[in-house]
Image (spheres, rainbow, N blue to C red):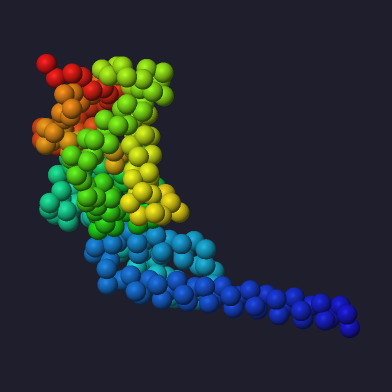
Amino acid sequence: MTEWATIVERAIKECREREQRIRTARKQLERLLELLPEVEQRPFALLSKLDELLEKLSDTLPQQPLQELQELRKWVNQRAKEQLANYTALLKETLPNADIKGRLSEGYWVNDFVEVRIDERKRQAKIGTRFHAQQLKGDISVVTVAEAIQAELKRLFERPFDPEAFLRDLFRAYLLALTADGRSGQIGTPVSLFSVHKFVTFLRQQDRLFQKGDGRHFQPYLPDEFAVDMGRLLERRHTELQGYWLHLHPVRNPKLFIVNFASKRGQNYGLMSFQPVR
């Protein structure tokens, strides 16, 4: 009797596992149904879900639905190929207010600052800077990538910016960086831009604590946000303070890429200083 009970228990277990796989397949099919109306805009979202379903759960589906889903995959794959063939034009059409340079095979630069790299073979995309980026897997549809670009542009460019306050913080941070280098008071001596960024971030925490009395939450200030604010300052030509003017020192090796948003030109800088106005 024990042997027969084991056989029955094994059959019950297999039924439960099959039931679970069927439930999983049903949920994925319901998700496919939700994605179908957006196939023209987001073909890669549907294609990724189809591939996952066909790869992992094809043995769960009856033969006829399986064949029909394979035909659906061919149709969706064609929509995806058509989007890839017109990717640059569609991306510019989706983001009409953005300055987009480049092409799919080599990558894009948006507003001279946000980099977009798309691997169509792996269906992966990276959108952002070397300090902060979004990673997309599976759905590399134009609309999805455009939404990620918009999020990065908002993070970088839609922060409030007071050039007077920023220049004051920059000068204070520069003096602190000089002290940290053992060159206290030697104004005009170049210091690391990353050292200045560190002290600007520190000063922002101190100011926030003083103004709001709340030191529980650290306010992040990433190097790329700092670089954008430097570019904003250059754009406004607001670089003089207390008889000194801001000077950036370019370097060969990539450090901090800063764009002058007035001239639309940028380069890598590694050092900065305040020089006496002559």
**Quarter that holds the C terminus:** top left
Q: Nearer the viewer, residue 248 or 22?
A: 248
Q: Residue at x 30, y 61 (%)?
A: 43
**What residue is shown at x 41% (from left), y 64% (from top)?**
49
Q: Farthest bottom residue?
A: 1
Above or below 21: residue 216: above
- Choose top left, top right, bottom left or bottom right for residue 237: top left
Q: Is residue 59 left or right of residue 78?
A: right
Q: Is residue 193 visible?
A: no
Q: Could you tell me which residue is drawn at 29 percent across and 42 percent down? A: 225
The spot of residue 194 in percent (x, y) is 36, 30
- Viewer-proximal residue among 13 and 197: 197
Look at the image and tell me whether residue 32 can be seen.
yes
At x 35%, y 62%, the residue is 45
Quarter of the picture containing the N terminus is: bottom right
* Residue 156 rendering spot, x and y as whole percentages: 26, 46
Up the image or down, 174 lies above or below 97; here it is above
Residue 170 spot, x, y in % from top left: 27, 33
**Along the viewing direction, whichever of 127 and 202 lies nearer the viewer:** 202
x, y percentage for residue 87? 21, 50
Q: Is residue 116 above or below residue 240?
A: below
